[in-house]
Image (tube, rainbow, N blue to C red):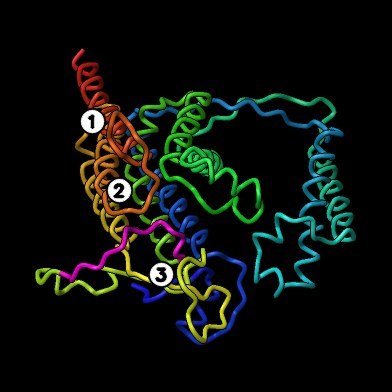
Amino acid sequence: MFSRCYPTLSDMISDLTGLNIPLPIFSYGFFLALGFLAAAYTLALEMKRKEQLGLLKPFKHRIEKGKPATPAEMLIHSIIGFVIGYKLLWVIFNYREFAANPQETLLSSTGSWIGGIAGAALLGYFKYWEKNKQRLDKPVTELEEVHPHQTVGDLTIVAAVSGIIGAKLFYFFESPGNFTEFLNDPFGSFFGGLTAYGGLIVGAICVMWYAWKKGMNPIHVADATSPGLFLAYAFGRQGCQVAGDGDWGIVNLHAKPSWLAWLPDRLWAFSYPHNIIDEGIKIQGCTEAHCYILPQAVFPTPMYETFATLLLFAVLWSVRKKITIPGMMFSFYFILNGIERYFIEKIRVNTRFDFLGLHLTQAEIIAAICVLLGAAGLVYFIRKHKG
């Protein structure tokens, strides 16, 4: 485990190798992307297996061939080309400034008009040329067979986009101050402050809706996604740990128990030096972009969740072929996820609410609901299977 935080991959490379390579990649985003790729891979494997078992079947997709490019298509591609060119040409001539703060640069009005106009012309013309090359005297409509595992890319995109939106919305619900922070600095705060359960709930709903619209059984798709959700979460939490984004535990001033003597000290209590949110006190003599360290060490809960969810992934992955009742895998996921999150919340820093006379965090409330829903799902799907 790293002994400090690395807000960007450049920080990590510089510290570990001594090489100063400016890369516009935040470490949290890098690990999050790895999580989505890992989940997509396991989903593809599971969907192929369920196709072989006859649980997921190919569906027909209507496509039109031979039509020329419409003005709307050319306009959309021209707009996309303008945005890409507007930013890209500026980045080429101002790379170091971009690498130092890519998030703010991409979401600002900074750019090159020459690059934007060139990009609009090129992409608009390319769309015209591409459609004209395939143009037929009489356009035809065909039905193309699509196998469920071929939709994994689309499912991943739906999960990513809806998950980020859901995570941001639930972050706003946690505290009115979070929304005020966003209003005061929408560019700077948009990609910070995400609630995992918000991403899970909204992402799951959207993925199941997409599966249903495509003619796939949403329950089988949900079962197929379950193991990979734990894997993706593990990568995401590792990103939180590496970046030091504030998702840590409460202050831990307790001496490490003797029975944990084998555990590295930084896994017992960690001060998150150089964290990305600049929380704590200034590190003397530091000249980096993020020079803060927590005044008191805390429980490194992202690491605990990384280990726990990797273990839960291994459990679900090992039993997936033995669970034959549709819906049970997803129900087990809800139960295990809820239990894991409920107990980790006991040592995490989070806003607490008065709920039925209890002081609980939003995550504890949702975790308890997840366990109840998972248990109810088990009962329902078992009874349904027995007929």
> Mainly helix, strand or loop, the magenta region?
loop
Residue at x 55% of width, y 25% of height:
60
- Quarter of the image that includes the N terminus: bottom left
Q: Which residues are magenta?
A: 243-256
Q: Identify which amino acid the numbered label 3 is placed on.
A: Leu
Seen as rendered, the residue at the extreme left is 259
Residue lying at 49% horizontally and 27% vertically, measured from the top left: 209
What residue type is disc 1 on? Thr
Query: What is the crowding at mark 1: few (fewer than 14 residues within 10 Å), some, or many (at least 20)?
Result: few
Residues at circles 2 and 3 in contact by the CB criterion of under 8 Å: no
Residue 324's tag is 1
Q: Amino acid at mark 2?
A: Glu
Q: Is residue 271 left or right of residue 207?
A: left
Vertical comparison of 19 with 296: above or below: below
User: What residue sits right under mark 3 in the picture?
Assistant: 294
> Which of pointers 2 and 1 lies earlier in the amino acid sequence?
1
Query: Residue 72 location, x and y as percent?
Result: 83, 33
Nearest the eye: 306 or 259: 259
Residue 315 spot, x, y in % from top left = 22, 47
Rendered image: mark on residue 152:
none
Q: Residue furthest top?
A: 387
Q: Would residue 261 be found to the left or right of residue 160 on screen?
A: left
